[in-house]
Each structure stands twice: as structure tokens, then as C-alpha cells.
Amino acid sequence: MTRRPVSTYRLQISDDFRLDEAAGVTEYIADLGASWAYLSPLLAATRGSNHGYDVVDHSRVDPDRGGEAGYERFAAAARAAGLGILVDIVPNHVGVSQPRQSVWWWDVLRLGRGSRHAVAFDVDWKAGGDRLRLPILGSSPADVIAAGELVVDTTPADDAPDGTLSYFEHVLPLAPGTGELAGDLPALLAAQHYELRFWEDQNTELNYRRFFAVVELAGIRVELPDVFGDSHREIVRWVREGLADGIRVDHPDGLVDPAGYLEQLADATGRVYTLVEKILEPGEALPAYWRTDGTTGYDALAELDRLFVDRDGVAALDRLDARLREESGLPSAASWHDLIHGTKRMIADELLGSEVRRLVRTLPYGIVKAEDALAELLACFPVYRSYLPEGVVHLRHAFAEARRRRADLEAAFAELEPLLADPALEVAQRFQQTSGAVMAKGVEDTAFYRYTRLGTLTEVGADPSIAAVTVEEFHEAQRSRLAGWPHSMTTLSTHDTKRSEDVRARLSVLSEMPDRWAEVLDELRAVASTGHGPLDALIWQAAVGAWPISSERLLAYATKAAREAADATRWQHPDERFEEGLAAIAESIDGDARPIVERFVAEIADAGRSNSLSAKLLQLTGPGVPDVYQGSELWDFSLVDPDNRRPVDFAARRRLLTELDAEVARGVLPPIDESGRAKLLVTSRALRLRRDNPELFRSYRPAVVEGEAADHAVAVHRGGVTAVATRLPVGLARRGGWGDTVMMRPEIPATDLLTGRRIEPGPVRLADLFATYPVALIELDR
């Protein structure tokens, strides 16, 4: 029988936080109440990587992260603490930024198609004239040669018997027998199994599949049995030898056949607990036949976030956005769906032009205007991808929408439609892989930074056109999760979220006071501005949401946000003059902007903390397997990576938990203040109760709340436990509080596990229940 976690705690393993250090926090994780430790990728990755998704050697645990011995010590510590182990794996791609470190890639560069590893990489050899295109040059090859920027070293090495070719930090092997051409650089270059290209050629001329638009991550063909075996041998060993109890699969949408891959993985591992990092659009269901226990929880995150957003306030923020655009001389805002159509089309035409051209090359016959038509279909695709024949309805939607927008391409659409619907054809297989990349780059990494009304709405897996959910809609989503995917993960923060849960909880308050936010934003823009109103709104929200924040952190965020938006400046071609405005904003928080930000944060902090505690309680007690991202048991005001991968002070958290337990035992409750102890209380009590008494969480029934403020409460009976939370706290305060609002409950006495307060049988007044905290965790007497 498959062993499954009750909850998990995510740890980012890196050379700054190695496996031995992780072993040292296993007792703390167990004391907190989590049932499994959840580890970031462990296979050998590019040196210095702080995430591990750039695997360079599948045969060993990363020595910089602790190596095999460190992993064994971690596993022993986890077992001693009673923890299971969930490990993140990366089947789609490998890291190639440092070729000499990447075992398979180096061999292919040296031997070309003659390498035993050549089949592992998804390369269009024909398009490259049997050569692998490497877009690493700062100018044309002729200019690079003329500038003397290429260095040839014919000294033999174990991994490069004929020597190496270097271009600044890039070191490449010479093909056998070509070292003798060192005196004739053009001839030497022509003799290699790779072709050096200008870096911008990656946009249109690349001939290997990559992860999204990252040329440093090369796609592998894990669908081939030998490649699967070679890339998973170590992972399977972990499972068989008791070093791992479950697997989290990164980016399955990049694979040719995710369902087939999951079948292989289940067979190889004995069907261990398996999750997929799969982003579902609203209304989209995870394929029921997949051999997985569910997703990593972005769908749950979106539902929880929107429970704390005021729909009417978002409409006011739309009006603010319109004013900012007019004042900045920008065009009126497009609808969300028109916006993402435009950004996805831009990505298909520019950053991922190489992938679209490869689709054209895989067509079984020539089609006039095929490149234009395929790019339009990718821009119109409504979800990340289909899994033919599953999801053909999405393909039909894309064709219908593309025909509506581009009637001039009807002839091409008519020829493409049967081809893209045939799962046996290569073009159909590759279209499915490409649509997810276009969606991710066009929506998550571009449109999310252009749609700046409210940062809470633009989180991974979310649709900003859905501004809020009602309590009833939230309950329905949770019932559906319990019925369909009871072991799917739920989350509020991850290493990939654009903003941490506490930043989003604080920013949600803006939806309850949009006019006040507009006033504050005007004050801040008068101090420092880029001249681009919507972008200013995004950056100043980051400052408010993550406060206190250093100018260095804010500048890093502002630069990434502006370049991702690709509106006024870009990654590939930064506008230095425009970016001076970003620096001015960042610098101003150490000057004239500081008192403005501090005053406003003081106004909204309490409401933000109410939202944070409420969302945390509902996540930790709701259907699914709740995950706690490292450090988020206290307030964590982090922005997008790498900000959210900063070191965590576990010693401080361990000390705080010990002190908290002792104080609560004496009847002393932590206040809701900047220390985060109140969040630690909610997290630890919910996790411990769920781990120790899972039988109390087997059902889901919305509790009945009656009274004038009923819409501000979310209450759920989970079996023997009731979770009660507050929503829209600013509106609640405006109406004068809870008044006579009551929650109906059985004629059985109970205890609020957060405060220790006894609750008499029958209905309870929320004003009494929430006298200390905006949340309650009620256990019936047994």
C-alpha cells in the first residue's frame, strides 16, 4: 500500500544549506508537526546553483549539497524524527551552462552524433547540418575571431584528448583529430560537432529543445527506455533503499508523453507517492488516468488567495489602473484574455521562434503561412497543453479562437487541424510540448508583470480575470478536491511563487481600501517614478507588501519585474535610461519614501496578518496534503526568486517554538505582532493535530454561520475538528465587528486549540470566539 504524507515541509538544499544541515532541522520539523520533509533536487547540479534544477550528472547526489553520505545521514535523521521523505526530480532537462560539468552534454559536443549520449538530447540534427548550434557569442563568429576572443588549448586532458576551445567563461571540447587545425581558426570551428552562433540566434535558429527559453537547460528524451533508465537509476535506488518515500516531478508538461512517463516511473518505483508540478487553469481537471496522487498545489493557492480579495475593490483598482495609463500616455488596458493573447504571440514570434520553426520543419508536407498560423494557435491555446487524445477540446478551442482573430489564415488552419489532432504525428507531439512553454513565458513571466492592479491576483496558476471567490465557491472547490484528489498537495508559498503568502495577504488588503491606496501611490510616485504608472504601482506594491525591505532587494525585484514585462525594458536589450527610474524608486525607500511606506504599512499590517493567519489555518486544515515552505511558519515577506530562496534562520525558529510551547503551557498566548509567534502557533497546532489525529479530517462540511457579518467568516467541519477564519477584515471593522453573528455547532462541548478556551455546547458568538485571534481551531470533546 502506498505510503502518503499527512503534511510536508519544503527544504531548499544548496551549497549554503547542505544535507547535513538539513539533517539538523529534522527534529524541529517533526516538533512543528509536519509528517514528511520535502527536498529540492539532489542530483549533481551546476556548481553554485541555488535550486538544483540544472542537473549535470544523474549518477550521483550533488557533492556540493552533501553527497551520498550526506543524504544517508539526512535520511537517518529524518527516520529518527519519524519523518517521511519527498524528493523533487527533474526529468525534462539538464544543465548545460558549464559544459564540462555536464557529463552527457560534454560528450555530445566532443563526438557529435557519434556520442552514446547523443540520443538523449532532443536535437534537430538535420536543421543544424549535423551540428549542435551554440548561441554563446557576443557578435558574429568572424568578429569574434578577428577580436582574438577564442582561445585554443591543445593540451590533452582526460575528458578532452584533443584539447579545448574557450570563449571567455565558455569551455568546449575539440572533436577528435581537430587539434592540428589550431592555427586556422575558421577551419577549426568548421570541423567541430557544434556551431558557435551569435547569442540572439537562440530566438530563431536554435536546434535543440530547451526548458522554456533557457538555452542553458537542454531537453532530454526521457521517453526512450535507455534514457529513462540512465536518468532515473539513482532515483529508483533511493526509493528501493529507503532514502525516499515519494517523488515530486518537475515540469511534466515538457515531456512528449507525461502519462507514459508516469507509468514508467510508477513501475520503476513500486508506485510510491508521486506529485506533478502541473499548473491547471480554472475549470481544467488533472487527467484522471495519470498515475499520480495530484499536483503541487497552485490550484489550491489561487482559491485561498481569492477568498480574501474584495471584488468591488478590484473594480476600483481597475479604474486606478486606467488613470495611471492615461497619465503615462499609455494605451487603455486590454482585457486579461486579450493581454495574454498578445504576450503569448510575442513570445511565440520572438523568444520561442526557434520552437515554432521546428514545428514547421516537422510538418509532413509544406503549408503556406504555417509559421504564422502555428504561432497564432499557440497564442490562442487556453491551457498549458493537451495530452492527446485527452484535451482535444482545448485544441478545438484554439482553432476556433484563432479563426476568429485571423480569418486570413483559414487555409493554413484547415490543413493544420487534422495534423495537430493526431497524437501519432511528431508535429502534434511537439505542439503539445511547445504550448506550455509559450503559456509559461507569455503569462507567468510577461503578462503577470503587466497586469499590475493587485499583486495577489498574479500568482503562478492563477487567472487574474477571476478577482475573488465567494465563501460558497471556495467550499465547493474544497469538496471537489477531497472527492477527486484527496492526496494532492496544497500550498501557499513555494520556491516559484511571485510573492510569498504573507506579501499577498497584505496586498489583498488594498482591495478593501482602493481609494486610500490610490492616495498613497500618488504620494510615492511624487517622490520617485519611472514615468510608467502601472509599473510604478507594481514596484510600490512590492515595497509595501514586503516591508521592511532593503533598497538592494527592491531594486533586484524592480529590475526583474520591468524586464519580464518586456514593455519599457527587456532582458535581452535593457533600456538603461528607463532603468534609472527603477533605481530612483529603490533608493527613495532609504529617503523621502520611507515615512510614507511606513505609515501606510502600519495602517494595513493588522488586516494583512488576519488574512495570513486565516489563509494558513484553512490551508493546513483543508483537503489535500498541506505543504509549508521553509521559514513560512513565521511571517515571511519574500518576493520572486531568488529573493524567496534566501537562507532561513532555523535556530531562531527552533528557539521560538520551544519558548512558545512553554508559554502556552503556562496559559500565556502570543500576541499578533511582528515576531510572527501567532503564525507559529497556528501552524504548529494545526500540523500537530492533523498528524496525530488524521481521523478528525476525513470529511468536509461547511459550517452554518448566521448574522449580519456572516460573509466575513469561513467555517468548516472536517469531522471532529472545525476550522473558523476571518475574511475581509477591513470591511468587518467598518461595519462595527461581528455583532450577534453566530456559528451553529453541535450540542457537544469543545476546545479552541489555539487559545485553550472551552466552548460550551450549541451556537457560539464569533465575537467571543475571535476575542484573541481572527481564527479558531475547535476540537470536539471525545
Image (cartoon, rainbow, N blue to C red):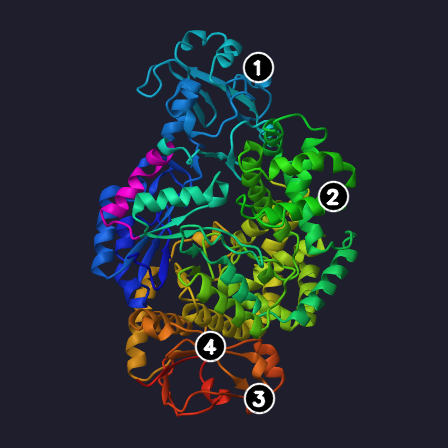
Image coordinates for residue 430, horizontal then vertical, percent = 55, 35
Name the one closer to the observer, 229 or 626.
Answer: 229
Q: How many marks?
A: 4
- The image shows residue 87, relative to residue 413, as above or below, that is below
Disc 1 + disc 4, Cβ < 8 Å: no
Quarter of the figure with residue 80: bottom left
Q: Which label is found at residue 717?
A: none
Q: Residue at x 30, y 20 (%)?
A: 158
Mark 2 residue element = helix
Label 1 vs 2, first from the N-terminus:
1
The span shown in magenta is 227-245
Label 1 vs 4, first from the N-terminus:
1
Side (left or right) of 256 relative to 778:
right
- Location of mark 3 (residue): 707
Image coordinates for residue 384, horizontal then vertical, percent = 56, 47
Label 2 vs 4, first from the N-terminus:
2
The three-letter code of the residue at mark 2 reads: Arg
**From this viewpoint, is residue 759 visible?**
yes
The three-letter code of the residue at mark 4 reads: Arg
- Location of mark 4 (residue): 701
